[in-house]
Image (spheres, grey):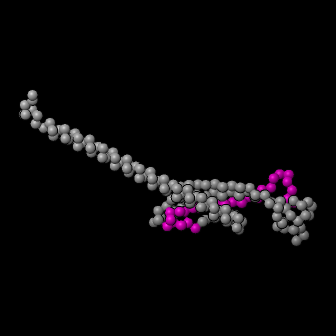
Amino acid sequence: MNSPVRQQGAVLMVSLIMLLLLTVIAVTASNVSTLQVRMASNSQLQNIAFQAAESGIRHGQEDINGSGKSGTLDYAADTSAGIAPKYAATTVIMIEPGSSLDAAGEGGGTSLVRYQVRISSHGKACDESDTSCDPTTTDNRPRAQHLLGCKIQAVAAPLCKQGS
């Protein structure tokens, strides 16, 4: 057997090693927990940006269907909810080569019109305190861009009649 003089301090060393291991485990668990909170927050902010971009697409469709506006249209952003969509809607009149503008024949009075509509919407998750949240600027906040396009062909009355 070992004498009591040689055993002094052994319990102290074992307890210090165990305390060190418990500290390492606690720090690792804390870091993992913090990472999970950040990932959940980023997922939530990305979802807000996605919904903002979708909202911009819907508002662009309503503007085009309701009034036929063309150009860049800014939706009034609700920054208190963290939603700041911006969308650009363009309407391009396209006439295919070899097609006639007169759908009813010579002097029929109606014309064939073909539209191509493109809507691009940008959404961004913003803080409530940020009043100048521009979805097209680059910073570390989640952003989303959605695109929508369609072609419309319609028979419509001419805009200008001959002789008027």
- Horizontal and vertical percent position of residue 74: 61, 65
- Horizontal and vertical percent position of residue 147: 64, 54
The answer to whether residue 14 is seen in the rendering is yes
Quadrant in the picture for the N terminus: top left
For residue 109, side relative to residue 129 (left or right)? right
**Residue sitting at 81 percent across and 53 percent down?**
96
For residue 93, side relative to residue 101 (left or right)? left
Q: Nearer the viewer, residue 116 or 54?
A: 54
Quadrant of residue 145 within the rendered picture: bottom right
**Residue sitting at 83 percent across and 51 percent down?**
97
Q: Is residue 88 magenta?
A: yes
Placement of 16 over or under 92, stated as above or below: above
Q: Nearer the viewer, residue 43 or 127?
A: 43
Q: Which residues are magenta?
A: 76-102
Quadrant in the picture for the C terminus: bottom right
Quadrant of residue 144 within the rendered picture: bottom right
Quadrant of residue 106 within the rendered picture: bottom right
Residue found at the far top of this picture: 1
For residue 68, side relative to residue 130 (left or right)? right
Residue found at the far bottom of this picture: 164
Q: Is residue 80 magenta?
A: yes
- Horizontal and vertical percent position of residue 149: 69, 55
